[in-house]
Amino acid sequence: MTLREVNIGESRSVLKVDGEGALRQRILDMGLTKGAQVVVRKVAPLGDPIEVTVRGYELSLRKAEAACILMK
């Protein structure tokens, strides 16, 4: 399951971050590392962006970025 598929209000932990180069590094720099707890707060009407809470702060991600994050 990817972060893109997690329902609003659900809490999951990060299993793995896929992707390459700058995109993967950017996701890791935002705190979405293995084991981090993520709560999906909101999803825009067209599904892009997705607002999540991770490590105590709010973060907005594009659908393409959320699809690179595998969740438990």
Image (tube, rainbow, N blue to C red):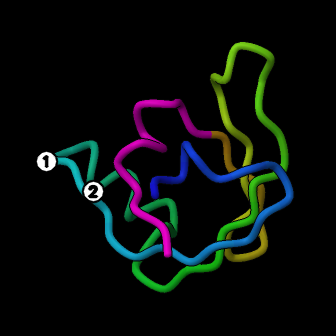
Q: Residue at x 63, y 22 (%)?
A: 48
Q: Report which residue position mark 1 lands on.
A: 21
Callout 2 crowding tier (Cα within 10 Å): few <14, some 14–19, many ≥20 = few
Horizontal arrangement in the rendering, residue 19 relative to residue 9 (left or right): left
Q: Residue at x 24, y 56 (%)?
A: 18
> x, y (%) of residue 1?
46, 58
Question: The magenta stretch spans which residues?
Answer: 61-72
> x, y (%) of residue 67?
41, 42
Q: Residue furthest bottom?
A: 35
* In the image, residue 3 above or below residue 63: below
* In the image, residue 38 above or below residue 59: below
Amino acid on which disc 2 is placed: Gln
Q: Report which residue position mark 2 lands on.
A: 25
Q: Residue furthest top?
A: 46
Horizontal arrangement in the rendering, residue 36 relative to residue 47 (left or right): left
CA distance for labels 2 and 1? 6 Å
Q: Secondary structure at mark 1?
A: helix
Q: Residue at x 70, y 13 (%)?
A: 46
